[in-house]
Image (cartoon, rainbow, N blue to C red):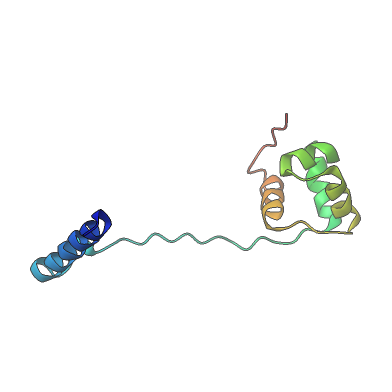
Amino acid sequence: MSKAYDMISASLNEIIDDIETTDGANLKQTVLTIDVDTVRNFTPSEIRKIRMENNLTQNLLAKFLCVSKKTIEAWEAGRNTPNGPSKRLLELLAKKAVAPVVS
């Protein structure tokens, strides 16, 4: 048979052996869960306030969020709204959880 078949077969035999000899004690796993809060929506004035509180120009905020300056202008004018990753970064900026470093 193939090497892959041999590896799968050996693994399954180990599982069967463990279940028969230790009632699967070696197969038990710890599951780690992480709760992530839903990202809130920002109004155009909130976006501008976040930008101003962080001493950023529209251009610098755009670079920090990896979007265009036109996108920031549209958000602040209410023509468009930020998406998930941008909303999360805006939230972190609002909470002062990150400091923007833009080069």
Residue 67: x and y in percent read: 77, 45
Could you tell whether 37 is left or right of 70 in the image?
Answer: left
Q: Is residue 100 above or below residue 24?
A: above
Give the residue at x 70% y 45%: 93
Q: For the C terminus, which image quadrant?
A: top right
Task: Between residue 28 and residue 18, name the one nearer to us.
Answer: 18
Q: Can residue 69 be seen from the camera position used here?
A: yes
**Towards the viewer: 92 or 101:** 101
Is 98 left, or right, of 9 in this rendering?
right
Question: In the rendering, at what x and y percent does residue 45 appear?
Answer: 86, 54
**Which quadrant of the structure image shows residue 30?**
bottom left
Of all residues shown, which one is farthest toward the left? 21
Q: Position of residue 60 (x, y in %)?
A: 79, 36
Q: Horizontally, is 33 left or right of 96 in the view?
A: left
Q: What residue sits 84% from the left and 59% below the top?
A: 80
Q: Residue furthest top?
A: 103
The N terminus sits in image quarter = bottom left
Q: Residue furthest front?
A: 1
Can residue 25 be seen in this snapshot? no
**Residue at the image point whose x is 73% and y is 40% from the top:** 64
Viewer-side residue, 77 vs 51: 77
Q: Position of residue 22 (x, y in %)?
A: 11, 66
Report the number of numbered marks: 0
Q: Quadrant of residue 9?
A: bottom left
